[in-house]
């Protein structure tokens, strides 16, 4: 079966990033929702293998199309994932049930790329 190259939007309210936390409780991002009735949200990822943060103005690869609304996207193919698999793939199998996924969280101020198993958990605080 051929893999789709389509960027997939993950359902979540629009937000701005307040904090990125990677500690003994796991990797999570705390955000302020743009919709005032929601307030704060937490985006939690299980089994994160790698992440990076950068200014979105410096982003030169896999730009998210402007016609796709939202902040969280699943990128089926990316240079970041390809690089990771070249580095770590010799030590662990990341195929089949062990496949990792590239998620991009992007706002006006920040872009965070995450390589993880499974989908993020988005919840109101």
Image: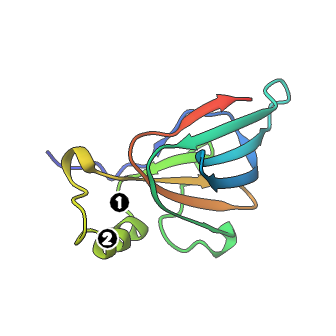
Q: Residue at x 66, y 67 (%)?
A: 56
Residue 97 on image: x %, y %: 23, 44
The answer to which quarter of the image holds residue 121 is top right
Q: Nearer the viewer, mark 1 or mark 2?
A: 2
Other residues around mark 2 within 10 Å, as few (<14) / some (14–19) / many (≥20): few
**Residue nearest the viewer, comparing 115 with 33:** 115
The answer to which quarter of the image holds residue 25 is top right
What mark, if any, has residue 77 been given in the picture? 1
Task: Determine whether, in the image, residue 62 is placed left or right of residue 35.
Answer: left
Residue 58 on image: x %, y %: 64, 75
Which of the colour schemes (rainbow, by chain, secondary structure, one colour) is used? rainbow
Q: Secondary structure at mark 1?
A: loop
* Quadrant into which the C terminus falls: top right
Which residue is denoted by mark 2 in the rendering?
A: 88
**Residue nearest the viewer, comparing 68 with 15:** 15
For the view shown, which residue lies furthest in the front direction? 24
Task: Determine whether, in the image, residue 50 is placed left or right of residue 82.
Answer: right
Q: Residue at x 60, y 52 (%)?
A: 105
Q: Residue at x 45, y 39 (%)?
A: 119
Q: Secondary structure at mark 2?
A: helix
* Quadrant into which the N terminus falls: top left
Q: Residue at x 85, y 29 (%)?
A: 36
Query: Is residue 110 placed above or below 87 in the rendered structure?
Result: above
Other residues around mark 1 within 10 Å, as few (<14) / some (14–19) / many (≥20): some
């Amino acid at each position: 079966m051929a893999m789709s190259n389509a960027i997939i939007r993950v359902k979540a309210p629009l937000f701005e990033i307040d904090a990125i936390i990677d500690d003994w409780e796991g990797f999570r991002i705390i955000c302020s929702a743009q919709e005032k009735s929601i307030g704060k949200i937490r985006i939690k990822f299980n089994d994160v293998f790698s992440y990076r943060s950068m200014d979105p103005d410096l982003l030169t690869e896999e730009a998210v199309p402007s016609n796709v609304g939202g902040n969280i996207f699943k990128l089926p193919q990316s240079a970041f994932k390809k690089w990771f698999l070249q580095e770590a793939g010799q030590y662990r199998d990341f195929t089949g049930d062990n496949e990792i996924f590239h998620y991009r969280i992007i706002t006006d101020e920040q872009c965070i790329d995450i390589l993880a198993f499974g989908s993020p958990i988005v919840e109101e605080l």
